[in-house]
Image (spheres, helix red, strand yellow):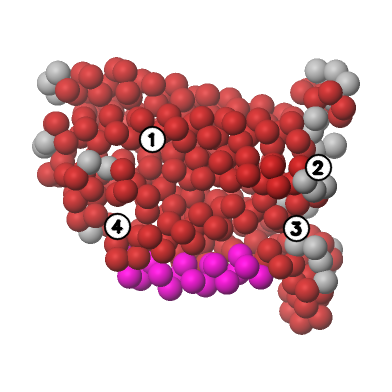
């Protein structure tokens, strides 16, 4: 594990957290009940979060590109070498994808300052940033036409992940709102609506993830025995990601089938327990994205 490798993973992780969080928060008002949507958009922290997220996404996108350049050249001095950048952007198969991603990051950093008036633009730009990762990762190495099918599955995977991760962040902001915290029915309606969207998002994550894993590392061809699960860093990391997602699903089930019904029935302790559970679920989501960042730079055949 070198400094270059660590920098690349860190840049990927920060970018995933910021972009996925922005995407999920931007689409949340599209499906949230009316009262929940008004309260969410009325929170004073929303504008600050969008600006902070857009700024972090901008910096981390350029940081990711720089870390990828250093990882390719093996020399940190290449960051100050115009020829190295020209070769990286115009002389590689993934250069065009990076040019598009950098342009998207610039557009996003400008859009976030318009707040809720730019929710559609923020959702579209962050969706494109999430999906475009397919063309700078393992998926891009696949041959056509399989590459396009796997890219479609990857799109399901990352957009589902963004909807879930950013949606949980939106719920935390919503639950922290004093007015909705005093409105039991509004909270219950928002949670029930999110549980439906969350289920769809999880299905997209699972379908997309399975297709990608099998395409990148086919069980029938590349894994002669299950010992690879214990000897391959790629498989070990994938198993860790699955375990974390399973833990998130467990908390989501607890929220939906235990705390939400208790809150609806008037249990005064249910609200506090619900908030705590959702916050823990968010931290697990951050951990999942960290593992995802590591997974993206590991060699599946290693």
Label 3: few (<14), some (14–19) or many (≥20) C-alpha neighbours in 10 Å: some
How far is disc 2 from disc 4 in space, using C-alphas? Answer: 38 Å
Label 2: few (<14), some (14–19) or many (≥20) C-alpha neighbours in 10 Å: some
Residue 207: percent from left, percent from top: 59, 31
In the picture of the structure, the residue carrying the numbered disc 1 is 197
Please name the residue shown 37% across and 54% down the image.
26
Please name the residue shown 32% across and 23% down the image.
256
- Give 153 or 1, whichever is nearer the viewer: 153
Camera-near label (3 vs 2) is: 2
Mark 4 touching mark 3, by CB under 8 A? no
In the picture of the structure, the residue carrying the numbered disc 4 is 46
Up the image or down, 127 lies above or below 195; here it is below
Mark positioned earlier in the residue sequence (3 or 2) = 3
How far is disc 4 from disc 3 in space, using C-alphas? Answer: 34 Å
Mark 1 touching mark 4, by CB under 8 A? no
Camera-near label (4 vs 3) is: 4
Mark positioned earlier in the residue sequence (2 or 1) = 1
Up the image or down, 228 lies above or below 38; here it is above
In the picture of the structure, the residue carrying the numbered disc 2 is 299
Describe the element under mark 4 as helix, strand or loop: helix
In the picture of the structure, the residue carrying the numbered disc 3 is 4
Please name the residue shown 25% across and 24% down the image.
260
Is residue 205 magenta-colored? no
Is residue 109 magenta-colored? yes
């Amino acid at each position: 594990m070198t400094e270059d490798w660590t920098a690349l993973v860190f840049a990927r992780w920060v970018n995933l957290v910021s972009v996925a969080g922005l995407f999920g928060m931007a689409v949340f008002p599209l499906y949230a009940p009316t009262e929940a949507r008004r309260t969410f958009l009325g929170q004073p922290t929303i504008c600050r979060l969008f600006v902070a997220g857009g700024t972090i996404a901008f910096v981390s996108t350029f940081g990711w590109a720089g870390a990828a350049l250093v990882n390719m050249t093996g020399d940190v001095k290449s960051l100050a070498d115009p020829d190295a950048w020209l070769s990286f952007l115009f002389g590689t198969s993934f250069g065009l994808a990076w040019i598009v991603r950098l342009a998207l990051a610039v557009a996003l950093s400008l859009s976030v300052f318009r707040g809720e008036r730019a929710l559609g633009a923020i959702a579209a730009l962050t969706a494109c940033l999430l999906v475009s990762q397919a063309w700078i990762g393992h998926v891009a190495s696949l041959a056509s036409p399989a590459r396009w099918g796997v890219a479609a599955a990857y799109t399901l995977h990352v957009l589902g992940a963004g909807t879930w991760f950013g949606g949980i962040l939106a719920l935390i902001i919503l639950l922290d709102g004093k007015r909705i915290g005093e409105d039991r029915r509004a909270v219950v309606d928002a949670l029930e609506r999110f549980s439906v969207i969350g289920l769809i998002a999880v299905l997209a994550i699972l379908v997309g993830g399975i297709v990608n894993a099998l395409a990148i590392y086919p069980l029938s061809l590349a894994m002669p025995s299950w010992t690879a699960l214990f000897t391959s860093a790629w498989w070990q990391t994938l198993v860790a990601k699955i375990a974390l997602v399973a833990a998130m699903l467990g908390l989501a089930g607890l929220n939906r089938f235990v705390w939400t019904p208790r809150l609806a029935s008037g249990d005064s302790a249910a609200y506090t327990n619900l908030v705590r559970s959702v916050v823990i679920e968010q931290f697990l989501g951050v951990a999942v994205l960290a593992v995802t960042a590591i997974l993206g730079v590991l060699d599946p055949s290693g």
